[in-house]
Image: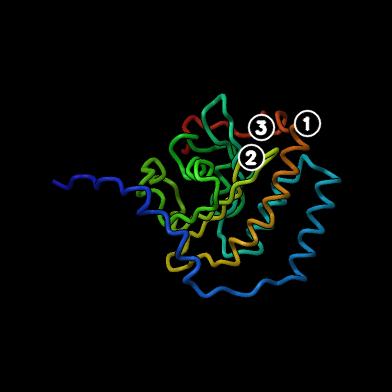
Amino acid sequence: MNLPEAPWELDEVIVTGKLEERESRAADVSREARVTGELMKELARMPEDFFPKLVQAVLDHTKADSSGISLLDVEAGRFVWPAVVGGLKAFIGAGTPSDFGPCGTVLDRDAPVLFAHPERHFTYLQSIRPSLEEVLLVPFHVNGEAVGTIWAVVHEAGSQFEKEDLRFLKSLSRFAAKAYQVLTETGMLNEILAKLPKHEAAVN
């Protein structure tokens, strides 16, 4: 009889420190300037469509195979994903519990976190396909309060994030914060969330 494996400890699936040990490509300053310039224009022009553009930029300019944004819903006790691209795009509108999940861990620590196979600790993630080889998350803040995360996922075994990926996500986090603020103040955020696909579980 094969018994299920016991969940790993949280610190066993957090490998943020390994980013310092890995070789990393150099920053492409001119390309990043173009990307951020385009994002600034998009935020001013159509803020309601900004989150999908933001996560697409992550997908295009990092080693990610999937990317998304998570927003904290305090009343519901969960994070919701209003924008997801790449291999996990079917999970748009899904999310994770605020008190037991990768995004919650990031907000608790108020710092970027790199996970290797987070499903080994957060076992409800085991059903997700494609598999979660590595997940890199960066928090963003409004008025000093962490309200969500930008995240990137590697699905291919053997592929890894680099320190430059983390730097790029941190650079984009200020745009996520500004968009969140604009959408909240204008009431558009509630409209965006209301139109998302409904998922019965935190993650299906």
Disc 2 to disc 1, C-alpha distance = 17 Å
Say above or below: 198 vs 57. Answer: above
Give how far across and how far down residue 63 sits, in percent: 57, 65
Q: Which residue corresponds to the image point at 30% horizontal and 46% vertical from the top-left?
A: 7
Callout 2 amino acid: Pro
Q: Is residue 162 above or below residue 90?
A: below
N-term-proximal mark, 3 vs 2: 2
Q: Secondary structure at mark 1?
A: helix
- Mark 1 or mark 3, which has the lower sequence index? 1
Crowd band around label 1 with a 10 angstrom C-alpha radius: few (<14), some (14–19), many (20+): few
Q: Which residue is mark 3?
A: 193
Residues at circles 3 and 2 in contact by the CB criterion of under 8 Å: yes
Tell me, for residue 185, which label it has, or none: 1
The quadrant where residue 72 appears: top right
Q: Earlier in the sequence, mark 2 or mark 1?
A: 2
**Left or right of 92 on screen, residue 54:** right
Q: Nearer the viewer, residue 112 or 90?
A: 112
Note whether 152 is above or below 108 in the view shown: below
Three-letter residue code for mark 1: Glu
Pinpoint residue 116: horizontal percent, then vertical percent: 42, 57
Amino acid on which disc 3 is placed: Leu
- SS at circle 2: strand
Q: Is residue 117 above or below residue 181?
A: below
